[in-house]
Image: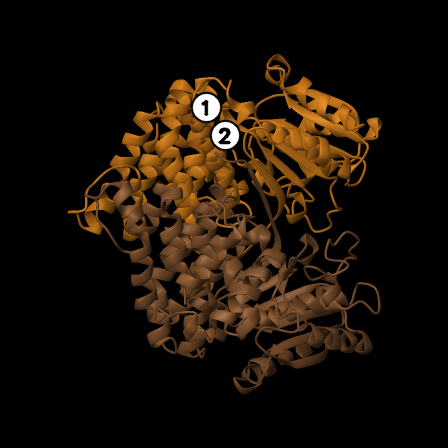
Chain colours: A orange, B brown
Amino acid sequence: MQAFNFTMPTKFYVGCGQVNQLKELAPQYGKKAMVCAAKDTMRQLGILDRVVGLLKDAGLEVSIIDDVEPNPRDVDIDRQVQFFLSEGCDFTIGLGGGSALDTAKAVAFMAAQNPGDSVRDYLAGGSKSDLADVKKPYPVICITTTAGTGSEATKWFVITNTINHDKPGVGHDLLMPSVSIVDPDLMMTMPPSVTRACGIDVLFHAMEAYLAKCANAFTDACALEAIRLVIKYLGRAIENGANDKEAREYMAWANTLGGIVIGEGNSGTVAIHALGHSVGGQTNTAHGLTMCPLAVPYLEMTWDADIERHAKLTRLFGYGDDTMTQQQLAELCPKAMKGVLERFGCDITLKDLGVTEEMIEPMTDSVFQTMAGVLNNSLKPFTREDVIALYKKSM
Amino acid sequence: MQAFNFTMPTKFYVGCGQVNQLKELAPQYGKKAMVCAAKDTMRQLGILDRVVGLLKDAGLEVSIIDDVEPNPRDVDIDRQVQFFLSEGCDFTIGLGGGSALDTAKAVAFMAAQNPGDSVRDYLAGGSKSDLADVKKPYPVICITTTAGTGSEATKWFVITNTINHDKPGVGHDLLMPSVSIVDPDLMMTMPPSVTRACGIDVLFHAMEAYLAKCANAFTDACALEAIRLVIKYLGRAIENGANDKEAREYMAWANTLGGIVIGEGNSGTVAIHALGHSVGGQTNTAHGLTMCPLAVPYLEMTWDADIERHAKLTRLFGYGDDTMTQQQLAELCPKAMKGVLERFGCDITLKDLGVTEEMIEPMTDSVFQTMAGVLNNSLKPFTREDVIALYKKSM
C-alpha cells in the first residue's frame, strides 16, 4: 500500500435544503459578505435572491458581484478584488459553478495579499507563483449550483491568463473553503447541456484520480464510488434533471467526492486534465467538454500501464464480463470509455471544440509551462512528442 | 438521499514509515510533549524509544506517562492531568491502542478546563456533562499501534467511571486530534488476540454505521469499504500478522475508515455498541470482544428493518448468492454474521466474558443513562425490555 496523507478542514453540508444552513453558518465569518454569483443564471433562477435573503435574515450586510462568466479571467479578478476591499467585506461566498467558486476563492486570496499585486503574479510563470510568502486569505463559503468541477472540495482556483491564453491553477492549503454547501435543490433547473458538461468532468476527476501515480487507498475508495454514481445517474440527470431529484442528489454528491479525491485526497488528475486545460485556455470551451476528445486516445496509450485498474474501469463502465482475463478487460478500456462518452452525448473531437492544427504547438507549450506536475502524475511518462501525438489523435 | 454534513480537520498520515513524519509535525504544536503510552508493550517493543527519539531529534522536551492500561479510569486521568500541568507540557501524544489515544485526548481536554474539575464531572450524569462551557483543549497527536477503536479519527474519549462502573464517552468537536499517524510498521508485532479484538471492533464500527439511522452517502461508502477490507484481511492479520504486511496495512486503513465513519462522518453506532459499552464497564473486557455476543441476536431482532442493507451485508460477509431475493438475503444476515464471528474466532457469549444474570439490570440502567443516543440510532426502537431481552439472548 502506498503511504498517503489527507485532511478535510472544510465543513461540508450535503443534501436538499442544506442552503438554509447559511443563516447559521455565515455570521461566524464576519458581518459583511461578498457574494460572487454566476452571471445572469443565479439572478434569473431566483437563487441569488434566496441566498441574499438568508444572509440578510442573519443580520449580515451583502455586496454582490453577479457578472462571473465561465473561465474567469485575471483582469476580472483584479477588478473584483478592488471592489471587495472598497466595500470592506469580511468573506466571500461563491454561488454558481466552478467559475463562481473559483472567483470567490481568488478574490478572498488576492484581497489578503499585497496591494497592487495582480492575480497574474501568482499564476504559473508569474513572479510570485512559488507562493512562498502567502498571507492568510479571507474565509470562503462555496455554494455549488452545478455538479461539476469539485471546486467546493479543493484548494485550487483556475484562472485564464489573458496574456498567454493558458488556464493555470493556483493551489494552496489555505485556499480550502471554510464551508461548502452542496444542495441539489439548487441544481434542479440546470439545463441538459450544463448537466452534461459538468457531469462528465466528475467522471474525469474520479477516473483520472484512480489512474494517477498519487492514487491511494483513500482516493481509490472515493473515486470508485464517484464513478459508480456517474455511470448510474448522469444519464438520468441529463434526460430528466428537472424532475429526477435522486439523480441530482447523487450527481451532486459524486461531484463533491470527485473534488475530495483530487483535492484533499491529494491524488490529483493526469494528462487528460493537463491537456484539457490548455484546450480551455485556447477555445473558452466549458471545462468538462475539453477532456472528452482526449480520453479515448489517452487510454489507448496507457491501458497497459496498470492492467488491474484499467480492467476494473472497464467493468465499472458496464463492459466486458467475468469470463474475460484482466488483460482482455484492460485492453477493452478505451472502447468502454468511448461507449460511455457516446451514451452521455460527449463523443466529440477537438475540432468540434474549435481547435485547429495551429493551436497544437502553443497548447503543448502551455501544458509543459503550467501543467507539468499534473502531466507527470500519469502512469506513463509523457514527452513533448507524446503530448503532440495525443492532441493529434484527438482532432 | 438523507442530508448530511462532515468535516475532517485532523491531518491523517497513513502507511508504513509515516511515524517518521512526527519529526516535522510535532514542533508545530509546542516545545514540550507529553507521551501517553500503553503500559509495558510500547516500551518492550521499542516503539516508545523510537517515538521519544524522533521528538528529541526535533528538539523537543518529552514527558512520559507509560502506565496507560486498557479501559482508562477517571482516577487515572485526574492524576495524569496534574502531571501534565506540573510538567508544563504543550500537547499530548497518544501512543498505543484506543486506551492510550483516549488518555491523550482526555488529559489534553481536562488540563484546559477549570483546576479542580474531575473528568468524572464531564462524563454522562456528571455536573458538566452538557459540555456547555468547554475551553479549547491542548493539541493532541494520535499514533495508533493497533487496528481497532478508530479513536484517531473521532472526537470521542471513553473513560470508565469507577463509582458506577459504566463506560461513557465524551465527545466534542474540539476533541478532534490535530494529527493522526496510522503506521502499520508499528502494528506488525501485535499478538493474535489483540489483532482479533481490535479487528472485530473495526467490523462493528463499519457495520453498525451502515445500519444506523444517521447513515448517509459519505459514511455508507466508507463503511462498505471498511467491511470489505476486514472480511478480506482480518483472518490473514490474525494468523500471520508478524509477516503479512499487506494485511496489516489494510486493517490499519480499515480501522481509520471505521473511525471516520462513526466520528467525523457522524453516522455513529447502534445498540450493539450501546450494550457492549456497559459490558466493558462491568467486566473490563477488551472493548472489541464485548460486541461479539450481541451481534447475532441484534441482527435477529432488526434484519427486517431495512431489507436492502441487510441483504448487502449478507453478500459482503460472503453468504448467499445472486439467485436469492433481497428478503431471503436479509433474513440470512444473522447467520452470515455468526459465520464471520466463527471464522475470526469471535463466536463467544456474554457468559464467556464473565457476565452474570445479576449484571443485566445494572448494565441496562447504564445503557439508558450513558448510551441512550447511540441506542436510539438503531433502525428499530429499543425499549428497556428489548435491551434486557438482547442481553439475555446473548448469554
Tell me: A335 left or right of B268.
left
Q: Amino acid at mark 1?
A: Thr
Badge 2: residue crowd in 10 Å (few <14, some 14–19, many ≥20):
many
Tell me: A292 left or right of B100.
left
Q: Which residue is most to the top?
A: A44
Q: Chain of mark 1?
A: A
**Which of these two is toward me, A246 or B130?**
B130
Query: Residue sitting at 70 percent across and 55 percent down?
Result: B174
Residue A17 occupies quadrant: top right
| Residue B10 against residue B342 in the figure, above or below | above
Query: Residue sitting at 52 percent across and 72 percent down?
Result: B145
Label 2 near label 1: C-beta < 8 Å? yes
Tell me: A49 left or right of B185.
right
In the rendered image, which residue does mark 1 sit on? A195
Query: Residue sitting at 45 percent across and 77 percent down?
Result: B190
Tell me: A10 left or right of A146.
right
**Which of these two is toward me, A159 or A21?**
A21
Residue A34 appears in the rendering: yes
- Residue B261 is situated, as x and y percent measured from the top left of the image, at 51, 52
Mark 1 or mark 2: whose residue is earlier in sequence: 2
Q: Are marks 1 and 2 on the same chain?
A: yes
Query: Residue sitting at 21 percent across and 44 percent down?
Result: B322
Q: Which mark is residue B97?
A: none
**Element type where label 1 sits in the image:** helix
**Which of these two is toward me, A204 or B385?**
B385
In the rendered image, which residue does mark 2 sit on? A147
